[in-house]
Image (cartoon, grey):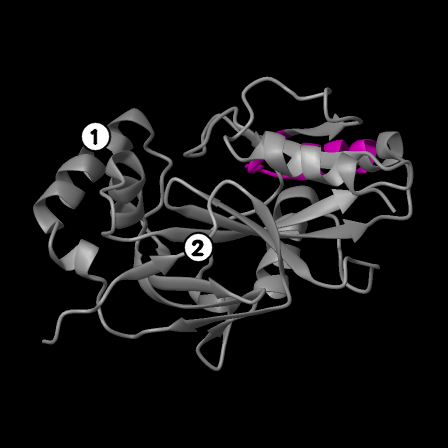
Amino acid sequence: MERLLLIFDLPRDAVVPVLSAEIALDPTPHPFETENTVAIEENWERETAANPALFNGEVMLLSRLRYREARLEGSCHMVRYATFLLWRRSRPIGSAEHAYAHAMPVTSDNALVLVRMAAHTANANRVYFAAGSFEPQDFRAEKADIDFNMMREVREETGIDLKGLDRDPHYHLRSAAGATVIFRRYFLGEPAQQVAERIRDFVAREEEPEIAEPVIVRSAADLPDNPALHIPALVGWHFANLA
């Protein structure tokens, strides 16, 4: 099998606009998975010993991602979640990268709605926007449907339906340490307190909720404890770019 050429050419540590994005699904195995089978299994045993609730489903891992003239294009492969966890732990330079999407819900009083992850998840107690890796269901004609992924994850974790809401005209991205977040603001028609109450009601009804609670952020200085590494930059960007 011809070895894939791994290419990652992105602006790092900066928020930039994305006018179009096309990430194609490559059906061949990702080299990181095929070359690290033993290490993947050993790490999965450690991860599941610490958290038996982990599920070894399929998620996306990139082999190529480029940003040119506000356009993003790349290729990805479906790998086991065990593979992703080893990559996330080790992050060997140039071996693979990860991309994920964030819908940023904005309330009518300009607050941001984040979530704190539940104790049984792989990111227990971390705070970020309701989101998750691209899964097989997020692809249409072998291309990532970014907005579908955003809406699906927000609905699954919070019960909020973003369909039909006003949103930013295009995406933005921020890339750092081998991980690229593609994000877009969606504008809710309710104030923060009311949105938070709706989410708490939804979580209370769930048998095994993915999140512990909503987290409302009202200013760039109003950061919660234990945020994901990229969250301060996204929060700061939002409050510097209010309409």
Residue 60: % across, % down: 38, 58
- Comparing 240 with 161, the one in front is 240
Horizontal side, residue 135 vs residue 48: left or right: right
Snapshot quadrant of residue 165: bottom right
Which label is found at residue 10? Answer: 2
Kind of residue at disc 2? Leu
The residue lying at 82 percent from left, 31 percent from top is: 197
Q: Is residue 93 visible?
A: yes
The residue lying at 75 percent from left, 27 percent from top is: 217
Kind of residue at disc 1? Arg
Horizontal side, residue 177 vs residue 5: left or right: right
Instruction: Specify whether residue 209 is painted magenta.
Output: yes
The secondary element bearing badge 2 is classed as loop
- Comparing 74 with 113, the one in front is 74
Residue 111: % across, % down: 81, 34
Q: Is the residue 173 above or below the residue 69 in the image?
A: above
**Bounds of the magenta span?**
196-212
Dot placed on the residue nearer the N-terminal end, 2 or 1: 2
- Comparing 38 with 50, the one in front is 38
The residue lying at 27 percent from left, 43 percent from top is: 87
Q: Residue furthest front?
A: 69
Residue 225: % across, % down: 59, 17
Residue depth check, mark 2 versus mark 1: number of the one nearer the observer? 2
Q: Dot 1: few (<14), some (14–19), or many (≥20) neighbours within 10 Å? A: few
Instruction: Specify whether residue 167 is painted magenta.
Output: no
- Numbered disc total: 2
Q: Which residue is denoted by mark 1 in the rendering?
A: 46
The secondary element bearing badge 1 is classed as helix
Q: Is the residue 42 above or below the residue 166 in the image?
A: above
Q: Dot 2: few (<14), some (14–19), or many (≥20) neighbours within 10 Å? A: some
Horizontal side, residue 51 vs residue 227: left or right: left
CA separation, marks 2 and 1? 33 Å
